[in-house]
Image (cartoon, rainbow, N blue to C red):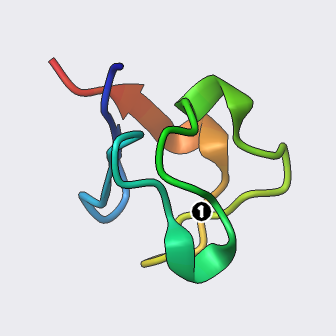
Amino acid sequence: MKKYVCVECGYIYDPEIGDVQNGIEAGTSFEDLPEDWLCPICGETKDVFEVLE
């Protein structure tokens, strides 16, 4: 699965880890995150994330 990085703060969403503190289980792909999910560091929306190459 692809990792995604927040262009505002550098937080990396790794689907293998998820975002357990915010109710996102490990194994959840970025595309399957709820539309209202926010970056746990800076609070930005999903649309500021880019694929980590």
Front position in the image: 26 or 52? 26
Residue in view at x 84 percent, y 43 percent: 35
Judged from the image, the secondary structure of the residue bearing numbered disc 1 is: loop
Front position in the image: 48 or 12? 12
Quarter of the picture holding the C terminus = top left
Q: Residues within 10 Å of mark 1 (few under 14, many from 20)?
A: some
The x and y percentages for residue 10 are 24, 58
The x and y percentages for residue 31 are 65, 24
Front position in the image: 35 or 19? 19
Residue in view at x 84 percent, y 55 percent: 36
Name which quarter of the figure residue 15 lies in.
top left
Residue in view at x 63 percent, y 36 percent: 47
5 w.r.t. 23: above or below: above
> As drawn, which residue projects farthest toward the left?
53
31 w.r.t. 8: above or below: above
Judge from the rendering whether residue 13 lies leftward or rightward of residue 22; answer left or right: left
Quarter of the picture holding the N terminus = top left
Name the residue that disc number 1 marks: 44
